Image (cartoon, coloured by chain):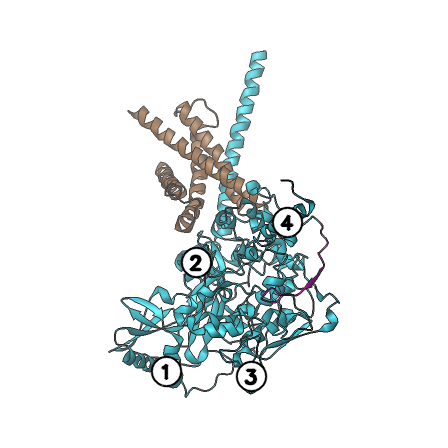
Chain colours: A brown, B cyan
Amino acid sequence: MFSSRINMINTLWFISFIGMAITGFFPLILGNTTLNGWWMILHVSIAPLFSILLAIGALHCAKKMGIDFKDAPESKLSRIIFWFFLFLFIPNALSILFSMNTWFVSSTQYVFLEVHFYSAIGMLLLVVLHFNFSRKNKG
Amino acid sequence: MVMNQNNRIKLFFIGLIFLLQGTLFSGEGKLGDSPDGSRHPAVHKIKLMDHDSSIIHLYEQPLLPFSTEMTCGACHNYQSIRSGWHFNAGSAGNDGRNSQPWIYSNPKTLTQIPLSYRNWDGTFTPEEIGMSVFKFTQLFNRHHPGGSVGEQEKFWDKNNIFRWNVSGKVEVNCLVCHDVDPANDRSQYARQLKKQNFRWAPASTVSFADVNGSAKDMPDHYDIYYGLAPDESKFIPPGIDYDKNMFNEKDEVFFDVTRNIPNKNCYFCHSSMIVDKKRSEFWQHGEDVHLKRGMNCVDCHRNGLDHQMVRGYPNEYRDRNSPELYAFSCAGCHFPNKNDQNISHNNHGQIPQHKGLPPIHFDRLSCTACHSGEIPESESFFTKTSMAHALGTHGINKADSTLPHIITPVFQKDDNGKISPVNMVWPSFWGWKNDGNISPMNQDGYESIVKNVLSELPLNINGSWPVIEENQISDILTLFASQKSESTPVFVSGGKVYVQDSNGLRSLDNPIADPYAWPIAHNVRPATMALGSGGCTDCHSVDLPFYTGIITVDSPLKTDDAMMVDFHSKNLFAAQVFSNAFIFRPWLKGIIYLSVGLILSILALFLINGLGKWIESTQLDEN
């Protein structure tokens, strides 16, 4: 019962991650210089779901793997990817949260956007790397 | 052969004459056009010259009005000056960014049509409605500093050529901007134009001259030098009296003119006033923040001898291929390091903080969207302008609703895809449709018919549209159709084209009925009064004017109003969904903060654990 819930959470998280990646990067691939309109609405709507599912999933994974690199069923690379992903999530989320407050001037807002963009690219690459690695291990 | 002393002197003077001719008459390098660096204004105690370049002596008869071309042009390059933005409509290769048109309106003929000699989309040339340059000059040059088509014979209708001879051409009126004599009466200019005293108009404004009589009352053969035969006309011919006390013994007169134009001079042609019942008193109307802080219009809107005024819009430096102009745009002044193009003025505006403003706003909105024009309210306003409503002249209709109806503010996407505030006028005119193309009718072709059909309507003293029913439009169109069988008469109004057919009056969509809009740059509001100073929900809210403000679709017929969103994003649903998202925004932020907190805790545990393991391993190594 518990593992099926965890599986559901992981699946939902992955779907929301794909949603975040598509709504975040696809408009830029299409030639838009900024995220706006429906893309923005979708991106912002998925964001809370993505982040809370990530937090729950992270809690579970940390519990499962332990908070070090030893004595866990997962490979060392998987664990590095996991911890690095969590590490990147912090600037990614905080940059956009801070930009929604009236604390920072416009030039800093541009920096926040850059941080959000590049940390998102990093997260995407880590996920791609993880799946590529998992597929090779299975193969 | 040895040249004697006399011949040498003769040759020297002949050479000097050629040299002077080369410099004085070639239009280059005139005395007043090369500043020596002194910031003290030059004192203009000068002789007046008439149109024949003769010095005006007060004892001579007939006394002629002074010519600005000859008087000012003696020391300033008139040909270069007249190429400037204010004077080059009709002759410029580059028409520039669209701006306020001249608006011909007449409630009795249901007409309101934007006119321009510049090739701006949505405007019509006066000739297209059958208005000659002569008529145009009489009607609109009241707020025009001269030059342009009124000065160039090639634009003149041959039927009016004798009238032009009587009235004279419309020279650049240097004094309307440069004269700072408080007694300069610019409204006199408008008065003289009505009397067709074009040649006398600039002189009529100065404090030392009085113009009387009327060229309009003179016959076509009237000659300003010989006048009329004693019994030829009971009317007074145009003439001028100079105040002898203002002239010195050398027939020189002092002009109080300046290079640094005061704002009040600009205001004669560039005033505007919002029609708002809540602001019935003049003191309730604000002014541009730059002017309130002591700047002058010409601090930004600068020009050289060619009078190509800096207009100050974002891409002007590209359009004119002049990088230094960037410094005179909003961003160029307020973000001084951008583009590194601040070479020509040494003052900068405050660098705005824009705290909490997501950068996407700089990509999607012009600076003016938040800072210029009226703050949008639930319904658009009418605005009255000097150019459109003849403000500051005598005998105008001061009613709030007098035509033309200029709608403001409307947020519209500009050529760069940015949302900017604009003023807007809905064209209303009678036209002919040929092969799908609609062109306006000549005034002569419709005026009498329309006035006849509408003659029963009560007199409308407020100068606004009369109350019109569709059947009256049908009647008028039917009468037009009986005149010209090969074309279809149409009435363009309120964003629609009305056509009369066997089923009655039909309204069609056609781009020719689209409103003409031009950008608003002033009045600029300070940061504390900018849109967004009250937070995101200044705009991003379901029922706020930025999206759902009512925009009047102006027409003598009943029309449905438009909504602000129709002119910019055109997607009310998306805007409303996004606006609704702001209701849940605290939740959104809360959930993400919670997630960040949880993940930070896990990371902290990971780091503390790692640190513990490292200390443990180093202790083991030491043991």
- As measured in the structure, the alpha-carbon distance from the residue carrying label 4 to the one carrying label 1 is 67 Å
- As measured in the structure, the alpha-carbon distance from the residue carrying label 2 to the one carrying label 3 is 65 Å
Residue assigned mark 3: B229
Label 1 or label 3, whichever lies nearer to me, is 3
Do the residues marked 3 and 4 share a common chain? yes
Residue assigned mark 4: B16
Residues at marks 1 and 3 touching, judged by CB atoms closer than 8 Å: no
Q: Which three-letter amino acid code belongs to the residue tagged 4? A: Leu
Left or right for B287, reference B133: right
Residue toward you, B80 or A122: B80
Label 2 or label 4, whichever lies nearer to me, is 4
Q: Which quadrant is home to the N terminus of chain B?
A: top right
Q: Chain of mark 1?
A: B
Q: Chain of mark 2?
A: B
Residue assigned mark 1: B449
Label 3 or label 4, whichever lies nearer to me, is 4
Residue A20 pos. (x, y %): 40, 42
Q: Is residue B494 visible?
A: no
Q: Which three-letter amino acid code belongs to the residue tagged 1? A: Ile
Do the residues marked 2 and 3 share a common chain? yes
Q: Is residue B517 visible?
A: yes
Q: Main secondary structure of the magenta part?
A: loop
Residue assigned mark 2: B568
Badge 1 element:
helix
Q: Which three-letter amino acid code belongs to the residue tagged 3? A: Ala
In the current view of this chain or complex, which residue is farthest to the top? B623
Residue B241 pos. (x, y %): 66, 75
